Image: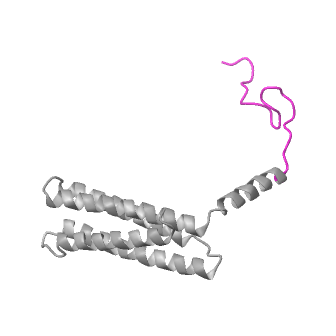
Amino acid sequence: MLRRPALRGPAEGLCPTERQPIKRRSGTALAACLSALAVLTGCGSTASTLSAAARDSSSAIATARLALSLDTAGKLTNAATATALDDALKELQTSRNTVLQLAPASKEDREAIKEALTVLDDCAAAMTTARDAVASSTGTPAVSDGVDGLAAAADRVSKLKEKDGGQ
């Protein structure tokens, strides 16, 4: 049995190491930090965000094309190819969501966002066709349809990258 009461922690409102009252900070410091964070995150331009989305999408398409070429050469299993295509599709969706969150400041920004979304939607459609071709046991759609769709998607993303400054 305990002979004295057990301490459950520091006394309410006291600093645990010094047993002095804890000074409460006003919400002003928190508000200042949140304002600074909002300003910093809003500083990214539409063009740089679109350029990053195009780069990421280009990488995802290249991964998918490599997986399909290895699959057709018999050097990759269907399961591994399907996983690579699913991962690439998720990357495309992430890029699309990033573009959707942009707040266009001008008419040119709105047009650039619209074009990027159209390209990313076409890329996702090509990626889905490729994924369905790998998963299909009937041969419909054909893997060649997926290969052709991804090649066209790669060209569209390449043109989008060039238009956004060649980054």
Indicate yes or no whether the magenta region holds residue 56: no
Q: Magenta residues, as a range? A: 1-27
The part of the image, by quadrant, that contains residue 132 is: bottom left
Q: Is residue 24 left or right of residue 139?
A: right
Quadrant containing the N terminus in the rendered view: top right
Query: In the image, is residue 25 above or below residue 154?
Result: above
Residue 98 seen in render: no
Q: Is residue 145 left or right of residue 93?
A: left
Query: In the image, is residue 52 above or below residue 119?
Result: above
Indicate yes or no whether the magenta region holds residue 11: yes
Q: Is residue 76 left or right of residue 87?
A: left
- In this picture the colour scheme is one colour
x%, y% of residue 11? 80, 32
Q: How many marks?
A: 0
The part of the image, by quadrant, that contains residue 63 is: bottom left
Q: Name the residue rendered at 37%, 74% in the picture.
A: 156
Q: Name the residue rendered at 55%, 65% in the picture.
A: 49
Q: Name the residue rendered at 20%, 65% in the picture.
A: 134
Q: Nearer the viewer, residue 58 or 91?
A: 58
Query: In the image, is residue 138 above or below residue 81?
Result: below
Query: In the image, is residue 132 above or below residue 28?
Result: below
x%, y% of residue 125? 33, 75
Q: Name the residue rendered at 59%, 77% in the picture.
A: 109
Majority SS type along the magenta span: loop
x%, y% of residue 30? 78, 52
Q: Nearer the viewer, residue 10 or 5?
A: 10
Q: Nearer the viewer, residue 28 or 41?
A: 41
Residue 115 seen in render: yes
